[in-house]
Amino acid sequence: MTVAGIISALIVGLIIGALGRLVVPGRQNIPVWMTILIGIGAALLGTVIARAAGIADTAGFDWIEFFIQVVLAAVGVALVAGAAGRRSITR
């Protein structure tokens, strides 16, 4: 992987993670780096799911793949924020 590939993965992860975080209602007490990691994971997993379903290679922008990625990021943010919230309450 090249430096440009790593930088583009970080940018895509940031965007997908931020959109996923916007979809989840309420305040999420998780750090930005965790949002980026969730976004990168959601982007990769969303691409795998879209390719497996045969919808990743379309002409133009892949809106369905993008939607899958954002939904996965929202689920990831909600799970991590929920786990972080429960952990801080029990202390």
Image (spheres, grey):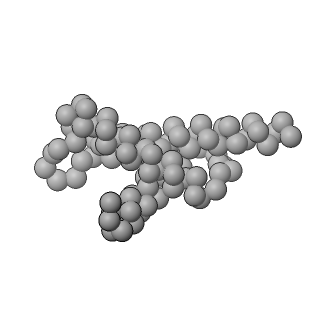
Residue at 43%, 61% (x, y): give it: 10
- Give the percent coordinates (x, y) of residue 12: 39, 58
- Give the percent coordinates (x, y) of residue 39: 46, 50
Most extreme residue toward the bottom is: 3
Q: Quadrant of residue 4?
A: bottom left
Classify residue 87 as left or right of residue 15.
Answer: right
Classify residue 57 as left or right of residue 68.
Answer: left
Most extreme residue toward the right is: 91
Classify residue 45 as left or right of residue 20.
Answer: left
Viewer-closest of 13 and 18:
13
Most extreme residue toward the front is: 1
Whether residue 23 is visible: no
- How many marks the image carries: the answer is 0
User: Would you place residue 79 above or below residue 21 in this image?
Assistant: above
- Give the percent coordinates (x, y) of residue 44: 37, 45
Tell me the quadrant of the picture where the C terminus can be found.
top right
Most extreme residue toward the left is: 59
Classify residue 71 as left or right of residue 91.
Answer: left
Residue at 73%, 41% (x, y): give it: 85
Residue at 82%, 39% (x, y): give it: 89
Tell me the quadrant of the picture where the N terminus can be found.
bottom left
Whether residue 82 is visible: yes
Viewer-closest of 2 and 40:
2
